[in-house]
Amino acid sequence: MSEKICNGAEGFDCTASQRDDEHREAAWGAVFSLALGIFALVTAEFLPASLLTPIAADLGVSDGAAGQAVTATALVAALAGPAVVIGTGKIDRRSVIWGLTLLLVLSNLLAAEASNIGVLIAARAMLGIALGGVWSLAAALAMRLVPTRLLPRAMMIIFTGVSAATVCAPGMGAWLGDLWGWRTTFMAAAGIGVVALAAQLIRLPRLPSTDVPDLGTFGILLKRPGVRLGLITVMFVISGHFAGFTYIRPFLEQVPKLDVQMISLLLLAFGIGGFFGNLAGGFIAERSASLAVALSALMLAAMAFVLLTWGVSASVAFAATAGWGFAFGGFPVSIQTWNTLAAPDHAETAGALLVTTFQVAIALGAVAGGLLVDSFGAPGAIAYSGAALLMGGLAMLLMGRRHAAS
């Protein structure tokens, strides 16, 4: 895939200034430390979905209200992505990553001590800053840590942090929450963040700022058809996914009427599916990023409709949840590949745009899902999810190849 990036894959141009020095050594330790930090971030991001019921009960709010902790993270991350890229433009990127990982740790500690929904939302807002900042910088940093020919391997390692979190966070979060309580589970997530910060303090090299983007750079990127199509697809797919996934536990409790042990197993199946989906998504994206994005979205839609139609069966719910995980596992690496190919000359700014769109979509999905859950029960959120995912998949399937060549 690295050869494609620097030779205008799928119609995108790449100038000489974006080519990495092929003779420098790859900083694999630094790449792994970034992957560990992303594992800690995604683990913390996913925890509310697996702990929603006990959090709501303990804080004395509805499932829909507790789900707005996801909304808070997403809204803040949407603003934090561009703000971090622009506001820290002259600061060594190593120091920025250290600060964001420390903020992740503090947010989990505050969440563990939350006495009401307001404190929990404040804690999750802190996580949003860390999440938006790290995701905006991740791809650009990978391009600086390894030669161009090794960029696909570096991106796969970084996204393995996401895959590992999808395996561990949903199932283990529900299981540990039942065993220790949801507060202790957030403390454990803080511990993971401390380990990630230690690795980054040891392994990340100095990364002086090489570009100071401004608001005009965002305007330049938004004029590119490929960038716009990617962002539209993200809006549909991510809002649909989080409308369903945020409220998957209430659905599994209400429709197939599963107990917490079985729900933990289903969420573990979701995570394992996500791990293999990441590998499949990366493999397909090397050949066609648009096809990888479309297939992920359409499979997600199919799994949502299967749950909605036949989800009363425990075996069907198990298979559909695992399939959902597989499909979603392929989406982040696919859309990041598309985004990188669309704007290799402004990697940090393109990353910030993608993060902002991701987080706005998460917020919209969580809000819509919460309203539907409180009004129609968990199946209402799954129905919205399937419709939005289908629209996102069809958009990329029908227009992806054309815009890739524009």
Image: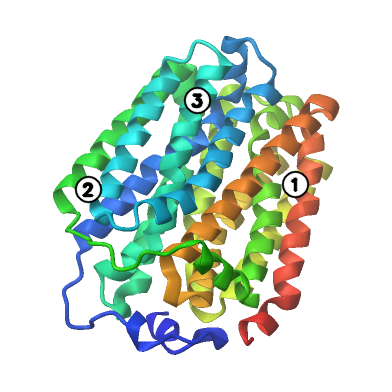
Residue at image coords 55%, 29%: 48
The quarter of the image holding the C terminus is: bottom right
**Inter-mark Cα distance, 3 to 2:** 26 Å
> Can the viewer see residue 290?
yes
Q: Is 383 rendered above or below residue 296?
A: above
**Which badge, 3 or 2, comes first in the chain's sequence?**
3
Q: Which residue is mark 1?
A: 385
Q: Which residue is mark 2?
A: 200
The crowding category of the residue bearing disc 3, from other C-alpha atoms within 10 Å (few below 14, some 14 to 19, many at least 20), is: some
Q: Nearer the viewer, residue 300 or 241?
A: 241
The crowding category of the residue bearing disc 1, from other C-alpha atoms within 10 Å (few below 14, some 14 to 19, many at least 20), is: many
Q: Which residue is mark 3?
A: 122
Residue at image coords 75%, 68%: 395
Quarter of the image for residue 44 reads top left
Task: Tell me where residue 138 appears, x and y as whole percent.
Answer: 38, 58
The crowding category of the residue bearing disc 2, from other C-alpha atoms within 10 Å (few below 14, some 14 to 19, many at least 20), is: many
